[in-house]
């Protein structure tokens, strides 16, 4: 009988630990590596301007020619239609960023996403919260207007990138 109580106590402690870890992860979500790379380059190019213009090819390093961002609500069939069947799997509650070269996937990354507003340090293309089409695609020569917004005074800014004429 004593062993059952010990096992039950350990099981309850593990469940509590997992639940607290999950809540902590969601509460402290940060932007991912591709977002962080783009933000560093935006801040270097734009300085403290609230708006500026950048070329997408200057935001992400590597040899690529096409960029895709699939929002949180995009289903697997839409991703397969754009990229080819079973090339990139969607992730629950995350955006998917893809860099391609000649139809070949160079980088695919799932990024955290702020539900009420973007996370500090996140780049958002065409204002994901308000666009009808839940994904975008650009070539590396696309010029983007960068608008900077405060996410949380203690945590920093996020950036909304909108395609513009050169």
Image (cartoon, rainbow, N blue to C red):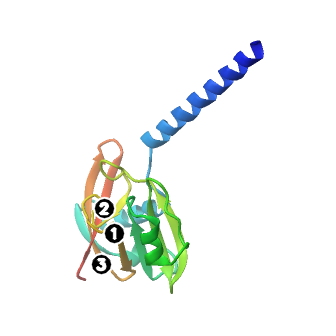
Query: Where does the image place residue 130, in percent across and percent down from the top left?
Result: 24, 60
161 shown above or below 66:
above
Q: Is residue 162 left or right of residue 62?
A: left
What residue is drawn where x is 54% and y is 77%? 105
Front-lying residue, 44 or 1: 1
Query: Residue 77 appears in which quarter of the rendering?
Result: bottom left
Query: Which of pointers 2 and 1 indicates the residue nearer the eye?
Result: 2
57 shown above or below 112:
below
Distance Cα–Cα, label 2 vs label 3 = 18 Å
Query: Residue 122 appears in which quarter of the rendering?
Result: bottom left
Instruction: Look at mark 3 in the image and give the residue it sits on.
Output: 143
Distance Cα–Cα, label 3 vs label 1 = 13 Å
Q: SS for tag 2? A: loop
Front-lying residue, 81 or 55: 81
Which class describes the residues within 10 Å of circle 3: few (<14), some (14-19), or many (20+)? Answer: many
Q: Is residue 25 left or right of residue 15?
A: left
Query: Where does the image place residue 104, in percent across and percent down from the top left?
Result: 54, 81
Q: SS for tag 3? A: strand
79 shown above or below 36:
below
Query: Where does the image place residue 16, in percent across and percent down from the top left?
Result: 56, 28
Query: Where does the image place residue 59, in percent across and percent down from the top left?
Result: 41, 71
Image quadrant holding the N terminus, namely: top right
Which residue reaches farthest top? 2
Circle nearer the N terminus (2, 1): 1
Q: Is residue 23 left or right of residue 14?
A: left
Instruction: Look at mark 1 in the image and give the residue it sits on.
Output: 45
What residue is drawn where x is 59% and y is 30%? 15
What residue is drawn where x is 34% and y is 49%? 115
Q: Is residue 60 visible?
A: no
Instruction: Look at mark 2 in the image and give the residue it sits on.
Output: 128
């Amino acid at each position: 009988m004593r062993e059952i109580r010990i096992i039950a106590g350990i099981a309850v402690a593990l469940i509590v630990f997992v639940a607290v870890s999950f809540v902590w992860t969601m509460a402290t979500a940060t932007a991912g590596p591709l977002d962080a790379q783009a933000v560093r380059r935006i801040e270097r190019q734009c300085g403290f301007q609230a708006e500026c213009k950048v070329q997408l090819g200057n935001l992400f390093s590597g040899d690529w020619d096409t960029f895709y961002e699939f929002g949180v609500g995009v289903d697997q069939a839409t991703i397969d239609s754009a990229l080819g069947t079973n090339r990139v799997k969607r992730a629950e509650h995350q955006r998917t960023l893809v860099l391609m070269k000649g139809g070949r996937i160079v980088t695919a990354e799932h990024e955290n996403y702020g539900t009420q507003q973007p996370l500090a340090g996140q780049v958002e293309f065409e204002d994901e919260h308000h666009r009808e089409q839940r994904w975008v695609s650009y070539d590396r020569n696309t010029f983007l207007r960068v608008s900077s917004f405060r996410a949380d005074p203690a945590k920093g800014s996020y950036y909304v990138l909108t395609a513009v004429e050169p």
